[in-house]
Image (cartoon, coloured by chain):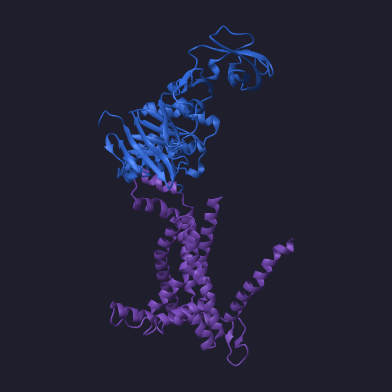
Amino acid sequence: MRFVIGLPFLWLGLFFLLPCLLVLAIALGTNAPDSVPPVELGLSFKSFALLFSDDLYLAAWLSSIRIAATSTLVALLLGYPMAYAIARAAPNRRPLLLMLVVLPFWTSFLIRIYAWMGLLADNGLIEQFLRWTGLATNPGTILGTEWAVHLGIVYAYLPFMVLPLYATLEKLDDSLLEAAGDLGARPLAAFLTVTLPLSLPGIVAGCLLVFIPAVGEFVIPDLLGGTETLMIGKVLWDEFFTNGDWPLASAVAVCLLVLLVGPIAIFQRNQARSLERRT
Amino acid sequence: MSSGPIVRIEGLTKRFGPIVAVDRVDLEIARGELFALLGGSGCGKTTLLRMLAGFETPDEGRLFIDGQDMTDVPPYRRPVNMMFQSYALFPHMDVATNVGYGLRRDGVKAPEIATRVAEILKLVHLDDHAKRKPSQLSGGQRQRVALARALVKRPKILLLDEPLAALDRKLREATRFEMVRLQEQLGLTFVMVTHDQEEAMSMATRLAVMNAGRIAQIGTPHEIYEHPASRFVADFIGIANILALPEGGWMALRPEKITLAAGRPDLPRAVAGTIVDLAYEGDRSLYHVATEAHGTMIVSAANTSRTAGGAFSRGQQVWLGWSNEAGQRLEA
């Protein structure tokens, strides 16, 4: 019995905690380009010091937060009506609609982002469409801009917004809305005073599920963004693979983790509280 | 303000797909009545109430409240408020905020809202619970919050959907009197839906017995009980022995109108029988008596002495007697 309980902890310790500690150890080492691996372990804060002295890292971090935050907001504005519509749909049609939300997961994430490259490229399908409809004669390049990065993040993480929102909206008791209407609330007022506050746990959960991975996102800015798109995940990649500076890359990773602990803690508390409310 | 009926319903019909939930109902409810819509599940009583509130739009017919045509008016513009069966209290608001919700929607000024909420909470004895959340209240307290929330806007009609169904028996009886007291004190019109005939009979000034989307009979509790118009009503309300008349047609005979005796009673109608079953109910006992002429009849007798199980026992030969006026001739 004790073994059964211990197994997941062993797993987490071995494949989650240990790698974290390894990354921390590397971050505290110094760069040694000629040895294998290219790091000399020690207790040096040189890499961390560099992170705070060079503006690039702060700028990358702020830009990641900004891109992740705006993408989260757009995903919320798109996802809320979607989740609301699914929750209000006839019960026998809901599984199909939910299926459609989850359907993109059947294709690899990487392939879907590559597909967006094709869509957004110069003379790609979207540009051709814009020209053909006459909406824009010379739309300019979308691929390689921050627009494309936002688009990619919203596209990739939208299901993570819709699903928790649906879960809270679906539980909403219809008679509460009827009661609001009966007491004189027009539909909009009923939404703002009843539906919205009661779906707050879903909003918080959805926003964090989009925001947290979006901050550290690497694939989307790398494939859809241009050289001017600065995101912390991309910086990390560059330090590791291009510059071969393991301690600096690890220091970036440690900082990213520390900075995301805050939102993750909020998420956990929100989940725990909505669980409590249900029981 | 007109002096006509507060509710006038003309040929109201509501269908859900192939099902006719409410079928050409005509009804008038007078000011200050405590009117009950009584019937089994699926009889259309709740749909009728929801059409009064505006949650369902009738397919045919007209609905007037205080002389004004409300057929197509949305719920938020109707001068009625409803107390929901589930109470539908807003879980994220405390008691005072719940009760003040309707006043805020009407743009009433904050100080006036505070006074009116305090007043109504006092009326339902919840003045010291204003800051509690609904989840921190007992079932009876929640019921009173729901009542206060529906009353605070001083609606022309208060609609009550099974107002006592969620309470336990003891509390239900106390609340019954409490609600009648409130209704008389406020002079409001109450329209209540219930499946509980005891509730309808004891509270309502008038009631409508519904069956299959139609009104089977409207009347005071006394009229409905003593003068049922049809076999359905006679059978639905209380217990009735339905006897076939020799000249054709039917008669309803209530168990307590029959005299049960060991020897032949000196009454115009008398039949002999055997007690086949009996149910002891404390204050009275119900006897199932097998008779030659009318099959098994149900007779009740008050247990005036403390003899075990009532005055008669199973298998005993007895006589049943009743007067000429004891039964009600049924039209249908």
Quarter occupied by the C terminus of chain B: top left
In this rendering, the answer to whether A110 lies above or below B61 is below
Q: Residue furthest left?
A: B1
A238 and A4: which one is in front? A4
Q: Residue furthest top?
A: B266
Where residue A250 appears, x then y in whole percent? 55, 80
Which hue belongs to chain B? Answer: blue
Q: Residue furthest bottom?
A: A34
- Image quadrant assignment for residue B300: top right
Whether residue B207 is visible to the viewer of this picture, yes or no, is no
Where residue A200 appears, x then y in whole percent? 45, 57
Seen at 37% across and 50% down, the residue is A190
B53 and A243: which one is in front? B53
B84 and B29: which one is in front? B29
Seen at 31% across and 81% down, the residue is A131
In this rendering, the answer to whether A161 lies above or below A276 is below
Seen at 39% across and 38% down, the residue is B23
Answer with left or right where residue A24 lies relative to residue A53. Answer: right
Answer with left or right where residue B302 lies relative to residue A55. Answer: right
Numbered disc total: 0
Where residue A168 appears, x then y in whole percent? 48, 56
Where residue A278 appears, x then y in whole percent? 54, 51
Q: Residue furthest front?
A: B247
In the figure, the purple chain has which letter? A
Quarter occupied by the N terminus of chain B: top left
Whether residue B43 is visible to the viewer of this picture, yes or no, is yes
